Image (cartoon, rainbow, N blue to C red):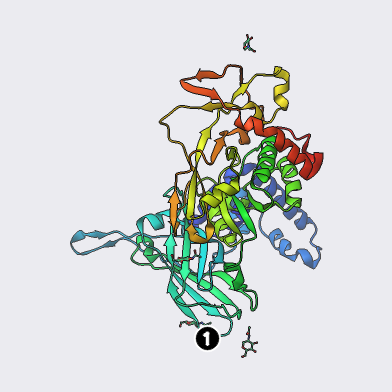
Amino acid sequence: MMKETDQIQIHNHKERKMFIGVVWNCAAELKLLLSALLFLCSLITLFQFFPSSVRDLRGCASFPPPSSAVQFLTTTIIPPPPIEPRQIKKLDDVVLEGGLIKRNFNGYGAAAYNFILMSAYRGGVDTFAVIGLSSKPLHLFSKPTYLCQWVPHNVTENQQNITTPGYKILPDWGYGRVYTVVVVNCTFPFPVGHDGAGGQLLVHASTSGGGDSNFDLTDTIEALTESPGSLNTLQFTATPKYDYLYCGSPLYGNLSPQRVREWMAYHVKFFGEKSHFVIHDAGGVHPEVMDVLKPWIEKGYVTLQDIKEEERFDGYYHNQFLIVNDCLHRYRFMTKWMFFFDVDEFLFVPKKGTIKTVTDSMSQFTQFTIEQRTMSNKLCYLDDTAGKIYRKWGMEKLVYRDIKRGIRRDRKYVIQPRNVFATGVHMSQNIMGKSTHKTEGKIMYYHYHGTISERREPCRQLVNTTNLNVEGTPYVVDTTMREAAGNVKRFELRMIGPVLQRTRQ
Ligand SMILES: *[C@@H]1O[C@H](CO)[C@@H](O)[C@H](O)[C@H]1NC(C)=O
Ligand SMILES: *[C@@H]1O[C@H](CO)[C@@H](O)[C@H](O)[C@H]1NC(C)=O
Ligand SMILES: *[C@@H]1O[C@H](CO)[C@@H](O)[C@H](O)[C@H]1NC(C)=O
Ligand SMILES: *[C@@H]1O[C@H](CO)[C@@H](O)[C@H](O)[C@H]1NC(C)=O
């Protein structure tokens, strides 16, 4: 009904007709409403002695009975047209000298926001990152600009009100849809608010016309407000609290609680005590998934963020580029290394190594990538009786590795976030320092594509050969993860007890 209520505020005759059209589109509900109203009016006609609280309604009793519901609507419910004209004056076509017709174009409203602010974080005493979405065509075909302003709570000699151009980064590789992700880097020529006096970061976002030379709309965004005494500049140089922090992509759909359980236990064990997981719920954390996360949240390993509101804005894959950039800047100074991969992927370091030996050997790199081992998401190893397979963990039964060559294998990546200004999904391009792909054999990830988003048994085909070919794809048995499962199960039991033993697919 919301829409119809809005429509009642219409102004001219033409629009009124449209309103009636709209009304009749929801005839069923409306008929009921109208009948109720008619009934009320007749009641009022009968009982003229109503108390003052319904005086408004008495007015309708003095009207002649409506000949039809439509007339009733147009004559009584709709308020008289307001005197004020619409803001935009319609320009008619003009016939010029010589019969030339000058056509006019009348614009109404805006189809996408100029900027949707998600967050803003400090990156140092003089620098900030402002993260949000913006109309994609605006960025593709026009040149919107950003001006950053620091407004101290108290303007003094040391703390001035200054502006600096914002440097915009579009980290989503053109994958955006209606909206694209924008990270505005505001770096001032000198420290602002560093004395702890507090202040506000404003970003003035100008559309530069969006291609329309008649307009250059500028919106002012209150990006960040620092209350006096709230800034702790030590955070920028202190040893980070965590060694490893996982920034998850938005979780959506009907996720398998059991697969999430396996992933959590495996990775808490893999990363160890000084690790943390930031999980973003875009609708995928239903009550049974929540049950699985809860013990780890209580242990302090997981932070869960509800980002469902982002669904209002049409971006790429539940706005994942927006979410990972927020995560980057939010936790930039809290961790030494930051990991970006999915919950159907399992990191692995071969024997003799640990995640620590790998990251230590990579310390001179800002970023390194991780190769993929593609696992079948439906072929299962039949070494036991078929009836028991249901109770096995995904990593135990899905052991067939795709060894087809030449196909593109996505890599996942790890960064030292203090040197990164914006991040993508498969790699960061706005970094300071070096990147390397030379990690073969040191660290890899097992990818069980799509197994997390299904709640039925993943095994579709039970096989017992070590080599096989399915629909042209060659597979070999790879029991690496299967061998790790026992330790992970014991680890889970030791850490959180038996609470998750009855988790289902
Ligand atoms: C903004 O960019 C500058 C220069 O590249 C960089 O030094 C600074 O750390 C960046 N700030 C943030 C918050 O990413
Ligand atoms: C701002 O300055 C006024 C007057 O000098 C002072 O009373 C007030 O406490 C100051 N506020 C802050 C946040 O420093
Ligand atoms: C900051 O400076 C601008 C332009 O110099 C001025 O218009 C604005 O009023 C100032 N704001 C404050 C809070 O001092
Ligand atoms: C492998 O499976 C086939 C049928 O699927 C069965 O006939 C055969 O005995 C099995 N071999 C072993 C070694 O389990």
Give the image location of residue 294, x and y in percent.
75, 47
Mark 1 neighbour class, 10 Å CA radius: few under 14, some 14 to 19, many 20 or more: few
Give the image location of residue 288, x and y in percent.
73, 40
Q: In this view, does 244 lie above or below 285?
A: below
Name the one closer to the observer, 296 or 202. Answer: 296
Of all residues shown, which one is farthest toward the left?
98
Q: How many numbered dots are placed on residues in this image?
A: 1
| Amino acid on which the number 1 mark rests in the picture | Asn
Q: Is any atom of residue 68 visible in this view?
A: no
Quarter of the rendering containing residue 135: bottom left
Name the one closer to the observer, 379 or 483. Answer: 483
Name the one closer to the observer, 56 or 410. Answer: 410
Picture residue at 56% right of the left edge, 53% below the top: 338
Name the one closer to the observer, 237 or 264. Answer: 237
| Quarter of the picture holding the C terminus | top right
Picture residue at 52% right of the left edge, 77% below the top: 192
Q: Is any atom of residue 222 visible in this view?
A: yes
Residue 432 left/right relative to 286: left
Give the image location of residue 236, x and y in percent.
57, 68
Give the image location of residue 328, x and y in percent.
55, 57
* Label 1: element kind: loop
Quarter of the rendering containing residue 394: top right
Picture residue at 61% right of the left edge, 17% below the top: 464
**Residue located beneath label 1 in the image:** 158
Ligand 4 shown in quarter:
top right
